[in-house]
C-alpha cells in the first residue's frame, strides 16, 4: 500500500482507508476501534520493509523446478536483441570496459559503443559524466544506420570541457555513415539544466563539440512528476466530482502536460532518425528517468518489434532495467526517502497507452498488458524490478532466489493480445507519427480507476472482439476437421452421390426434417460466452446520480466484522 | 399513439385458460386493437373466448418461476385466469391490456389548444377533453401533461408538460391536479422533476409561470435540477468548437478552454436528470412528471434519454427513430429556431441552442458505455446531427406539427426516415456488436466516464484514418465469425446427412 489513513470514528465503527500503488482504494469499516488501530499499525509496518529479502519475491513460490526457473530468467536475452538491431557491425562494437562495473556501477556489463571510441576515450568521457554514465548505444536503426545513444549530463559547470567526451560524441557522429551531424537532446527544461551548472554539472556547449545540434525538450524532474500525480489522484478520488472540478483539477495537476512533453520528445527523437537520418544522444541529469522514457518511446515509434508482446518486454529490459532506472527507489519498494519516489515508469506506460489509442492496429498487446506490467512493477512478486541497477540485482542473487516476471506474462499472453493487431501495419508506416495536439490526450481512466468498476463502460468491445477472434480460430479448425471427416465419409460410400436420390424416394421422409433432427444432436453448436455480454455493475446504487436521491435510498455502509471474519469492502 | 402500438406481444402460445366450472384449456392468446382472443386452435372442437378490452375491470399478475399468471376480473363480474409461459410475454400482455387507463385525445386536432402539441395525445382516460382545455389554460403554451412513456415492467409512467401558470399569487387549477393524480395508482406517490433550479422556478412566478405547490399536489414530491437553456447552451457550443479548432493550444490552455465551455457539465447534468427520472420509475416504482418552462427543450432531453435507459426498444434503429419522432418532432421541439445557426454564427439570436445536439451527445455517452446494447452506431447519431441542422429532407423543418402541416411538408418533401431505412443506407448505421439487451441500462455520470464526442468536435481537426480502419477491422472480424458459423453448420449438416444415409444403406 502507498498510503494508510484512519478516519474519525463513526457510529458503525472505525473507517480505515488503504490507498494502493496500483491506484486501488479500499475502505474498511472496523467495528472496534482497537482492532482498527492494530490493523493500521500492522499494515504500516508491513508496508515499510527495510531489507530486500523481506519482499514478497523472496518467498513467492510458483512451484517450478530449478531448470524452469532459470529458463525463465533467460527468456529475454539482450545480446540477442542487439544482434537483432544489427550490432555489432563495422561501426559499433561491444565494449568490455564496464565488465566489472568499474566504470559505471549503474550501467549493465555489456555496452555497445562506436568502434572508434577507444578505452581511454570511454574512461575519460565517463569521468566527465554524472555518475559515470557515458554515452552508449540504446538503439540502432539498421536501415538508417543511425543510433539512439544515452548518457547523463556532462560535468561542464560554467566552462569545463573534456576532450575525451568531445571525442566520444564525435565517434558517435562518425559511426553514422549517412549524416555527420548529430542531435544532443537534453530532456530537461533549460532552466533546470542551467541551474545544474552552478553545481558543476550542466549541458554541452555547442562550441566545444563539432557537428552537434543541441536541444532542450523540457520534461520536468521526478519531484514535479510526483506531486503532479499526487494532485491527479486527489482530483480523481473526490466524491461527487463536478465536470469543472475534474477538468480544472486535471489542468492544475499538469499530468497530461507532462505526458505530452514526454511523447513530444519521443516524436522529435524518432523524426531525427527517420527523417534526417541523424543519430541522437539523449540525456537528462543522471540519465535514468527522462532519458529512459524518451529513448524507449522513441524506439517504440521507430521499430514495430517493440510493439509486439515479446518486443515490449525486451524494450523494458533494455532501456529501463539494464540501464539502471531506479525501480526500487522510484516505486518505494523499501522504506526509504519518499522524495525518491516518482511515477516515471507509469508515465512511460501511459505514453504507450496513448499511442495504442491513436494506432489501434499497430500493437500486438492491449491495455490489460500495460496494466499488468504496472501491477507487477509495484507488486514485488517477481525479481525483475527489484533493486536499482544490474549490479545490485546480481548482489541480491535475484536469478537464484526469485522468479522472472516475463515467462508468467508470456504464459498468459492470450489475455493480452490485441484482436485488431495488424502485423502488416508497419509495412505501410515505418514510423508511428502520433498527433500530439493537446486534444488527443485523455485521462487514463482504466489506469487510475482500474478498480472502480462503476466508472468503466459496462460492456467491453475489446473483450467481445477478443473472444470473437478467438472463436474464429476455433471455427477455422472445426471446419478443417469437418471437411476431413466429410471426405472420409464420402470415401466410405463411393456411390454416395448416386445412392442419395433413390434412397430418399424409398423413404418418403422429409429431408429437412431428417437433417434438422441430426442437427439437433450436435447442439449446442457454439456456446456463446455469456460473461462477455453481461453488464457489470450497472445499477443505480453504483452510480453517482444516486447521490441526488439520498433521501430515497440510503446505501448501507459496508461494514467489516472481525468477529465473523467476513469483510465487505467498498472500492 | 394508437392502441395497437401499445401491444408489445400480439400473440402467445401454450397459454392455459382457467374458468370456473369449465375444464382447463390450452391454446393461443391473441391481442387485437379491441379484443383479447383465446383459441384452443383444435381442428375438431374449436373453443374460443373473445373479451373486449373495455370489459376488463382489473388485472393481477403473479409469477411462479418463469410461468406467469394473469387474473382478469371483468366488468360483468366474471373472473378468468390465464397461465402464460415466459416472464417477458406475460408482462407484455398484462401491460398491453392494462393500459386501458389511457385514451387518445383529439382535443388538439386543429392545434387550437396547444399550438406546439400534435393533434393526437395520450391522456388519462378519466379526464375528458373539456378538462384538458382547462388544464391547457393553466400550463405554459397550453402544454398540459401528456403521457410520454409507459414502463410496462411495473406500469409506472412518465408524463411531460410545461410549467403551471401559478404566478405570484399561487393560482391553482383543480383539473390540473385531477389530471396528474389520475396517473397515480391508489396509495402511490409520484415525482415531479422540474428541470430548473428552485431559484429559477421561483423567479418564473413573477412572469406568470411557476411550479406545483406541495399543498395542492400532496401526493407528489418535487425535485429541482438545473439544466441550462438557450443562449447559455449556444455559448457553450461556440466555446467548445472554438477550443477544438485551435490546434496551437498548449495542454493547460486546452483543458481550461474545455472546462470553460461547460459542454460536458451540461451533458452530465442532463444525463443525471434523465437517470433520476428513470430511477424514480424503475427503482422507486413511482410515476414521474417532467417539465421545465416551456416543456420543449430540457423536458424532452430528459424524457427521451430516460426512455433510452429504460426501454430496450428505443435502442434499436426503428425504435430510436420513433423516439425522435415522438419525443422531439411531435412533442414540438422547435428545430427551426434551435438549429437555425450552429457554432460559427456571429449574429446573436435568442432562440438558437444545441438542445438536440446535447441529447445526441448524451446518447453517444450511453452508447460508449454500453457498446453492445444499441442497434445503431456513432454514424447514425452523427447523421441525425447533420440533418437536424441542414437537410434535403422535410423531417426536421418547422418548429412543430402545426407548422409542418401548414407547410404541407408531408406532401411536398421527402422524409428522412424513408431514405435512412433503405437497406443499403441502414447498413452504414448498424452496430456490428449489437445484441438485444432487455435490461435497464444505468450509465455512469462521473466526469471520468464522460468524454468529448470526438466524432463531431474533432472530426475536421484531425485524421481519423487509423481509427476508421480499426473499426472496419472490427466489423470484418464479426462478419467473418458469422460466415464461419454458417459454414460449420452446413458441414455438420452434410456430415450428418451422409451418416444417416450410410446407416440407412446398411440397414437395407
Image: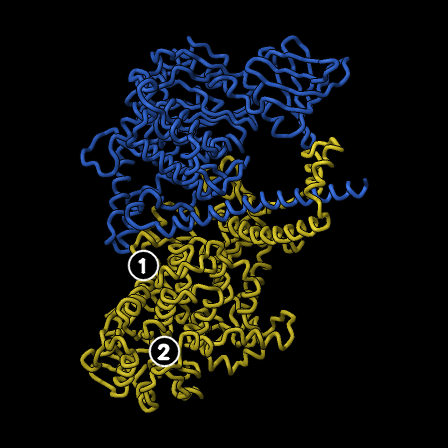
Q: How many marks?
A: 2
From this viewpoint, is residue B294 visible?
A: no
Are the numbered discs 2 and 1 placed on the same chain, yes or no?
yes
Mark sitting on residue A468: none
Q: Are marks 2 and 1 in contact (CB under 8 Å)?
A: no
Quick check: B455 above or below B57? below
Specify which label sits upstream in the sequence, 2 or 1: 2
Mark 2 surroundings: few (<14), some (14-19) or many (≥20) residues within 10 A: many
Spatial distance from mark 2 to mark 1, Cα to Cα? 29 Å
From this viewpoint, is residue B171 visible?
A: yes
Q: Chain of mark 1?
A: A
Disc 2 target residue: A137
Quick check: A281 above or below A7? below
Disc 1 target residue: A257
Q: Colour of chain B?
A: blue
Whole-percent x and y of residue B118?
38, 18
Q: Colour of chain A?
A: yellow
Q: Quadrant of the C terminus of chain B?
A: top right
Amino acid at each position: 500500500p502507498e498510503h494508510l489513513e484512519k478516519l474519525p470514528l463513526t457510529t458503525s465503527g472505525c473507517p480505515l482507508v488503504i490507498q494502493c500503488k496500483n491506484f486501488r482504494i479500499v475502505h474498511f469499516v472496523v467495528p472496534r476501534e482497537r482492532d482498527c488501530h492494530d490493523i493500521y499499525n500492522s499494515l504500516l509496518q508491513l508496508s515499510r520493509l527495510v531489507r530486500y529479502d523481506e519482499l514478497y519475491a523472496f518467498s513467492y513460490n510458483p512451484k517450478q523446478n530449478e531448470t524452469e526457473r532459470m529458463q525463465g530468467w533467460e527468456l529475454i536475452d539482450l545480446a540477442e536483441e542487439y544482434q537483432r538491431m544489427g550490432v555489432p557491425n563495422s561501426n559499433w562494437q561491444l565494449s568490455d570496459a564496464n565488465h566489472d562495473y568499474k566504470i559505471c556501477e549503474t550501467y549493465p556489463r555489456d555496452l555497445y559503443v562506436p568502434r572508434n571510441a577507444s578505452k581511454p576515450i570511454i574512461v575519460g568521457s565517463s569521468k566527465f559524466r554524472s555518475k559515470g554514465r557515458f554515452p552508449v548505444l540504446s538503439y540502432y536503426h539498421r536501415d538508417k544506420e543511425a543510433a539512439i545513444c544515452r548518457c547523463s549530463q556532462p560535468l561542464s559547470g560554467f566552462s569545463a570541457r573534456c576532450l575525451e567526451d568531445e571525442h566520444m560524441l564525435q565517434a558517435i557522429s562518425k559511426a553514422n555513415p549517412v549524416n555527420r551531424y548529430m542531435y544532443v537532446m537534453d530532456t530537461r527544461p533549460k532552466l533546470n539544466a542551467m541551474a545544474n551548472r552552478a553545481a558543476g554539472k550542466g549541458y554541452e556547449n555547442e562550441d566545444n563539440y563539432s557537428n552537434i545540434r543541441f536541444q532542450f525538450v523540457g520534461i520536468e524532474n521526478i519531484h514535479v512528476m510526483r506531486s503532479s500525480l499526487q494532485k491527479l489522484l486527489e482530483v480523481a478520488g473526490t466524491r461527487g466530482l463536478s465536470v469543472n472540478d475534474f477538468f480544472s483539477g486535471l489542468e492544475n495537476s499538469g499530468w497530461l502536460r507532462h505526458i505530452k512533453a514526454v511523447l513530444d520528445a519521443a516524436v522529435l527523437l524518432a523524426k531525427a532518425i527517420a527523417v534526417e537520418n541523424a543519430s541522437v544522444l539523449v540525456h537528462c541529469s543522471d540519465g535514468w528517468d527522462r532519458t529512459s522514457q524518451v529513448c524507449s518511446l522513441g524506439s517504440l515509434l521507430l521499430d514495430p518489434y517493440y510493439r509486439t508482446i515479446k518486443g515490449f518486454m525486451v524494450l523494458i529490459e533494455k532501456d529501463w532495467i539494464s540501464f539502471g532506472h531506479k525501480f526500487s527507489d522510484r516505486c518505494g519498494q523499501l522504506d526509504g526517502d519518499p522524495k525518491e519516489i516518482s511515477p516515471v515508469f507509469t508515465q512511460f506506460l501511459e505514453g504507450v497507452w496513448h499511442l495504442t489509442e491513436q494506432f489501434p492496429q499497430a500493437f500486438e498487446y492491449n491495455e490489460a498488458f500495460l496494466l499488468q506490467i504496472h501491477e507487477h512493477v509495484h507488486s514485488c512478486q517477481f525479481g525483475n524490478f527489484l533493486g536499482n541497477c544490474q549490479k545490485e540485482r546480481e548482489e541480491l542473487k535475484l536469478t537464484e532466489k526469485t522468479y522472472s516476471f516475463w515467462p508468467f506474462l508470456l504464459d498468459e499472453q492470450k489475455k493480452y493480445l490485441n484482436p485488431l493487431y495488424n502485423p502488416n501495419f508497419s509495412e505501410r508506416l515505418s514510423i508511428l507519427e502520433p498527433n500530439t495536439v493537446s486534444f488527443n490526450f485523455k485521462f487514463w481512466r482504466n489506469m487510475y480507476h482500474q478498480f472502480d468498476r462503476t466508472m468503466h463502460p459496462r460492456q467491453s468491445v475489446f473483450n467481445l472482439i477478443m473472444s470473437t477472434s478467438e472463436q474464429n480460430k476455433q471455427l477455422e479448425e472445426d471446419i478443417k476437421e469437418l471437411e476431413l471427416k466429410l471426405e472420409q465419409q464420402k470415401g466410405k460410400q463411393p456411390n454416395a452421390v448416386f445412392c442419395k436420390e433413390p434412397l430418399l424416394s424409398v423413404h418418403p421422409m422429409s429431408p429437412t426434417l431428417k437433417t434438422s433432427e441430426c442437427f439437433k444432436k450436435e447442439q449446442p453448436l457454439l456456446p456463446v460466452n455469456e460473461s462477455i455480454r453481461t453488464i457489470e455493475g450497472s445499477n443505480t446504487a453504483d452510480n453517482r446520480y444516486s447521490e441526488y436521491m439520498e433521501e430515497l435510498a440510503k446505501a448501507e455502509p459496508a461494514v467489516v466484522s472481525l468477529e465473523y471474519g467476513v469483510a465487505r469492502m467498498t472500492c | 399513439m394508437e392502441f395497437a402500438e401499445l401491444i408489445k406481444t400480439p400473440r402467445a402460445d401454450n397459454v392455459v385458460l382457467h374458468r370456473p366450472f369449465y375444464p382447463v384449456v390450452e391454446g393461443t392468446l391473441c391481442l387485437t386493437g379491441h379484443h383479447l382472443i383465446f383459441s384452443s386452435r383444435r381442428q375438431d372442437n374449436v373453443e374460443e373466448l373473445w373479451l373486449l378490452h373495455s370489459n376488463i375491470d382489473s388485472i393481477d399478475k403473479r409469477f411462479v418461476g418463469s410461468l406467469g399468471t394473469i387474473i382478469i376480473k371483468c366488468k360483468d363480474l366474471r373472473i378468468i385466469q390465464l397461465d402464460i409461459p415466459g416472464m417477458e410475454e406475460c408482462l407484455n400482455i398484462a401491460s398491453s391490456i392494462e393500459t386501458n387507463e389511457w385514451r387518445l385525445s383529439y382535443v388538439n386536432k386543429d392545434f387550437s389548444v396547444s399550438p406546439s402539441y400534435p393533434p393526437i395525445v395520450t391522456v388519462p382516460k378519466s379526464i375528458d377533453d373539456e378538462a384538458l382545455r382547462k388544464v391547457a389554460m393553466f400550463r405554459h403554451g397550453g402544454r398540459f401533461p401528456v403521457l410520454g412513456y409507459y414502463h410496462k415492467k411495473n406500469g409506472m409512467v412518465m408524463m411531460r408538460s410545461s410549467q403551471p401558470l401559478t404566478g405570484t399569487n399561487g393560482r391553482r387549477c383543480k383539473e390540473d391536479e385531477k389530471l396528474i393524480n389520475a396517473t397515480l395508482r391508489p396509495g402511490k406517490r409520484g415525482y415531479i422533476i422540474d428541470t430548473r433550479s428552485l431559484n429559477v422556478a421561483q423567479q418564473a412566478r413573477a412572469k406568470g409561470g411557476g411550479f406545483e405547490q406541495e399543498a395542492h399536489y400532496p401526493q407528489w414530491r418535487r425535485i429541482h435540477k438545473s439544466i441550462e437553456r438557450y443562449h447559455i447552451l449556444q455559448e457553450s457550443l461556440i466555446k467548445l468548437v472554438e477550443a477544438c479548432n485551435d490546434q496551437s493550444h498548449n495542454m493547460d490552455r486546452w483543458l481550461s478552454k474545455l472546462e470553460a465551455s461547460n459542454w460536458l457539465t451540461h451533458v452530465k447534468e442532463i444525463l443525471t436528470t434523465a437517470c433520476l427520472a428513470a430511477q424514480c420509475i424503475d427503482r422507486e416504482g413511482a410515476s414521474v412528471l417532467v417539465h421545465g418552462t416551456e416543456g420543449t427543450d430540457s423536458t424532452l432531453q430528459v424524457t427521451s434519454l430516460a426512455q433510452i435507459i429504460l426501454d430496450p426498444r428505443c435502442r434499436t434503429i426503428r425504435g430510436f427513430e420513433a423516439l425522435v419522432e415522438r419525443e422531439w418532432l411531435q412533442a414540438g421541439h422547435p428545430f427551426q429556431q434551435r438549429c437555425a445557426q450552429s457554432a460559427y454564427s456571429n449574429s446573436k439570436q435568442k432562440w438558437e441552442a444545441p438542445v438536440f445536439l446535447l441529447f445526441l451527445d448524451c446518447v453517444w455517452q450511453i452508447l460508449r458505455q454500453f457498446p453492445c446494447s444499441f442497434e445503431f452506431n456513432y454514424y447514425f447519431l452523427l447523421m441525425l446531427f447533420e440533418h437536424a441542422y441542414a437537410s434535403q429532407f422535410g423531417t426536421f423543418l418547422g418548429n412543430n406539427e402545426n407548422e409542418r402541416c401548414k407547410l404541407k411538408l408531408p406532401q411536398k418533401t421527402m422524409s428522412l426516415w424513408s431514405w435512412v431505412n433503405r437497406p443499403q443506407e441502414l447498413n452504414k448505421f448498424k452496430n456490428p456488436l449489437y445484441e438485444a439487451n432487455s435490461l435497464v441500462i444505468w450509465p455512469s455520470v462521473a466526469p471520468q466516464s464522460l468524454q468529448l464526442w470526438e466524432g463531431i468536435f474533432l472530426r475536421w481537426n484531425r485524421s481519423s484514418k487509423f481509427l476508421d480502419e480499426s473499426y472496419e477491422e472490427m466489423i470484418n472480424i464479426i462478419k467473418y465469425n458469422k460466415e464461419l458459423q454458417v459454414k460449420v453448420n452446413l458441414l455438420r449438416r452434410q456430415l450428418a446427412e451422409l451418416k444417416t444415409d450410410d446407416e440407412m444403406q446398411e440397414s437395407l
